[in-house]
Amino acid sequence: MNKIIDGKAVAAQVKAQVKSGVEQLAGRGINVGLAVIIVGENPASQVYVRNKKNDCAEVGITSFEYALPESTTQQELLALIEKLNADDSVSGILCQLPLPEHLDEKAVIGAISPEKDVDAFHPQNVGHIMIGDYTFLPCTPAGIMELLSHEGISVSGKNCVVVGRSNIVGKPMAMMLLKADATVTICHSRTKNLAEITSRADVLIVAVGRAKFITADMVKPGAVVIDVGMNRGADGKLCGDVDFDAVYEKVSRITPVPGGVGPMTRAILMKNTLSSKR
Ligand code: NDP
């Protein structure tokens, strides 16, 4: 059996469904549009924004790019968001993070209308996730849940361990697993005996940001391992947080990097944009 969970293939299916949904709306004269704001010249952010534009083109969503200079003030950025909030041709708004240091990320996220917040970072949408009643889910954890479900992997009653507690991955991931009836443990940099905890995981989800951080001795035989990490290895190649070759031998299923979680994150952004209220 092929142990690799092919995120690219599942993402292609999600995008095909989105494309068909966009076409149906177009048939009723409704256009779906995504506004992407990028401030400054962060090369990684520029790649992400380019990918998002390509994804929009692939599924028929109109993309509006706002590439603002590094010198953009908080006031200018908030004024743009206010304009986009009121623009009916814009279904979703996304501000690429991280922002330059002089800008207040929290205030920017809070300024985006919760109804257009396709990243699901607005506190109102975060609150909805806690309650388990939501319009938008953050793209990466939602993509992981979709991958698991597509592969027929139920988390109900399973020991699920999430390594990483960021607002965009770890915390919402834990909430979604909980909603799906998993028994969830969240680990972070202060966690003691990490290997002991990860070794008990039936499903191990890793979002740390350190190349090959999870080694084979930290994984339970037969576990499902989901690698969120995107790092550059010593050879300059993209790699995950999991020591893939060594861990592969031990597990039942595993996501590769690249080609695992990343494509799903992008596909869910398209799905969220389609599902935003208009
Ligand atoms: P953050 O840097 O915000 O969070 C990293 C988390 O890892 C923190 O909670 C931190 O703990 C924890 N951590 C750091 N060191 C250790 C350690 N030694 N032991 C246990 N936990 C540790 O990262 P993100 O969540 O934003 O992203 C994580 C990774 O996922 C990155 O590589 C990022 O590029 C990637 N990513 C990939 C996406 C995709 O689509 N594939 C989407 C989003 C992110 P503490 O809170 O205590 O500091």
Image: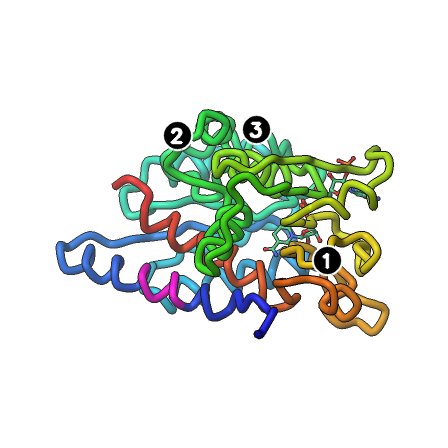
Residue at the image point whose x is 14% and y is 60% from the top: 27
Q: Which mark is residue 221?
A: 1
Q: Is residue 155 left or right of residue 258?
A: left
Pointers 2 and 3 in contact (CB under 8 A)?
no
Magenta part of the protein: which range? 13-18
What residue is disc 3 on? Answer: 107
**Res 234 → quadrant:** bottom right
Q: Is residue 16 found inside the magenta-colored segment of the image?
A: yes
Residue at horizontal 65%, vertical 48%?
A: 202
User: Disc 3 residue type?
Assistant: Ala
Name the kind of residue labelled 2 in the image. Asp
Q: Residues within 10 Å of mark 3 (few under 14, many from 20)?
A: few
The C terminus appears in which quarter of the rendering? top left
C-alpha span from label 2 to label 1: 35 Å
Give the structural element (helix, strand or loop) at label 2: loop
Tell me, yes or no, if residue 24 can be seen here. Answer: yes
Which element is circle 1 on? loop
